[in-house]
Amino acid sequence: MQVPAKISFHGVDTSEAVEERVNERLAKLEHFFDHITTARVVIERHHRSHSNMNAKDQPFHVSIVLEVPGEELVVKKDPKDPAVLKAHEDIYIAIRDSFDTMERRLKDYVARMREARRAS
């Protein structure tokens, strides 16, 4: 990556273990495409006031933005499905799901770039 990744926490305590996991997943993305110019990851937990939900039961939301030549790839996981909401109460599952989606998007981007080069 040309610029170090920016990892932000909103409504969540900063965690070295979580940052390490995010950096591991970013490194894996670089194996698929080594021309990522910047990466921004935001991990947040919304503190909605539901009478039957306390803060620790709120799901984690993970947003990832990768800048690659000619494009910006974005994943914003804001789960609506009740099963996913429950699973995303675990920060590591929320990170995994978001990075799995970004990995698919990055692979699609690489395939499009290869196809464009062949067509030229």
Image: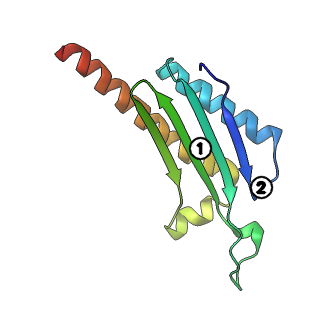
Mark 2 vs mark 1, CA separation in Å = 17 Å
- Relative image position of residue 2 (x, y in whole percent): 60, 19
- Relative image position of residue 34 (x, y in whole percent): 51, 17
Q: In this view, does 118 lie to the left or right of 102?
A: left
Q: In this view, does 28 lie to the left or right of 53?
A: left
Q: How crowded is mark 2: few (under 14 residues within 10 Å), some or many (20 or more)?
A: few
Q: Is mark 2 on a helix, strand or loop?
A: loop
Quick check: 67 above or below 53? Answer: above
Residue type marked 2: Val
Q: What element carries label 1?
A: helix
Q: Quadrant of the N terminus?
A: top right
92 vs 66, nearest the viewer: 66
Which residue was labeled with disc 1? 96
What colour-coding does the image apply? rainbow
Q: Residue furthest bottom?
A: 51
Quick check: 72 above or below 13? Answer: above
Point out which mark residue 12 bears. 2
Give the quarter of the image for residue 41. top right
Question: What residue do we see at 65% from left, 47% from top?
Answer: 42
- Relative image position of residue 90 (x, y in whole percent): 69, 56
Q: Which of marks 2 and 1 is in front?
A: 2
- Relative image position of residue 5 (x, y in whole percent): 66, 30
Residue type marked 1: Arg
Question: What residue do we see at 52% from left, 23% from top?
Answer: 36
Which of the two labelled residues, at mark 2 and mark 1, occupies the earlier sequence position?
2
